[in-house]
Amino acid sequence: MSDLRAADVAKVFEWFGIEPTQEESCYPWSPVFPAEWRGRAVVLKRGAKQHGPVAGWCRALDSVGVRVVVPVELAVENPAVVDEQTWVVYPWVSGRRYDGSDADLAAAGDLLGRIHAAPQPEVPLRDLELFEYSAEEAASDLEGLRERFAEHAPDDVERVMGRLEPLVRGFTEVTVPALQNPDLPRVSVCGDFKADNLVYTVDGPVLVDPESAVRAARIHDLALAALLFHTSFEGAPGRRFTADEWRVFRDAYLAHVRLTDVERRRWPDAIDFILGDEGIWAILDSTEWDVERQRAFLVDLAGTDRHAYEL
């Protein structure tokens, strides 16, 4: 969690010429400070290390009508490195959060489809580096997973470990090579398309956290949304997508993207990859096992079948 306060980064506010409007971060996991610039509501947040390409990608999306925040044009460079860290000022987006309705799901799927179908930026994003397990890491994570579930979901231990153990043990030799297939289309992707990174306005959802953007297989990004769209967002159900919710999201996405035969064949591998990488990280790193919604989500996530979401 972020323990920074606005006063701790006063030099950053001074650099950008903006004033904080509250002392605490409005996001618990990283520093995100509401601020004001010349009477305009903005937000200061820590940016991506590859801040130039990410900003360029946002501008490229915005130029074709894809709803994403774009760095505010200030009197100084934005984004910028201040005190050896990257910071960026975005406009504050007024709206509401995801409500779990079919309409909101369809709007989110539509936005992700538009992102994946958009022309590529002139300056490419960095390529996603696929995580691999060493034998030691695999053993350590499996031990940690069993401990987490034994403590917080004892009735589910054997079921979820029956899913996760073979996935972890075969992850580097089986799952990673499947996602390295050179025939998989790779585009600029969000890298973190989740409910808590969207704000819904009268014109539809806006992606307000583009900092995880990378160049990757688009089914990697789609699988991440399928499994993790509801994670860590208090207003979302304590579970991943149901089959019906997935169909609503998927159909809206496919209105903009025509998947290839290779993508359809490798889709279960993409589900495996997200579960074995992002999913296991979320399970092991969570500090909210005592929160019923989050506990239910993590248990549901851990048992995800690789064929759960039909393309």
Image (tube, grey):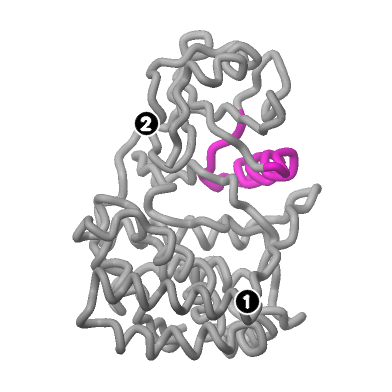
Task: Give the mark count.
Answer: 2
Kind of residue indicated by mark 1 = Tyr
Label 1 CA crowd tier, 10 Å (few <14, some 14–19, many 20+): some
Inspect the magenta stretch and tell me whether residue 58 lies in it: yes
Foreground residue, 117 or 212? 212
Give above or below for 47 relative to 293. above
User: Residue 133, labelled with which disc?
Assistant: 1
Q: Which residues are magenta?
A: 49-71
Residue 60 at what x, y percent from top left? 68, 44
Residue of label 2: 94
Residue 257 at what x, y percent from top left? 57, 70
Residue 238 at what x, y percent from top left? 24, 64
Foreground residue, 97 or 35? 35
Is any part of residue 166 visible from this angle?
Answer: yes
Kind of residue indicated by mark 2 = Ser
Q: CA distance from mark 1 to mark 2?
A: 41 Å
- Of tags 1 and 2, which is closer to the observer? 1
Is any part of residue 241 visible from this angle?
Answer: no
Q: In which quadrant will I find the N terminus?
A: top left
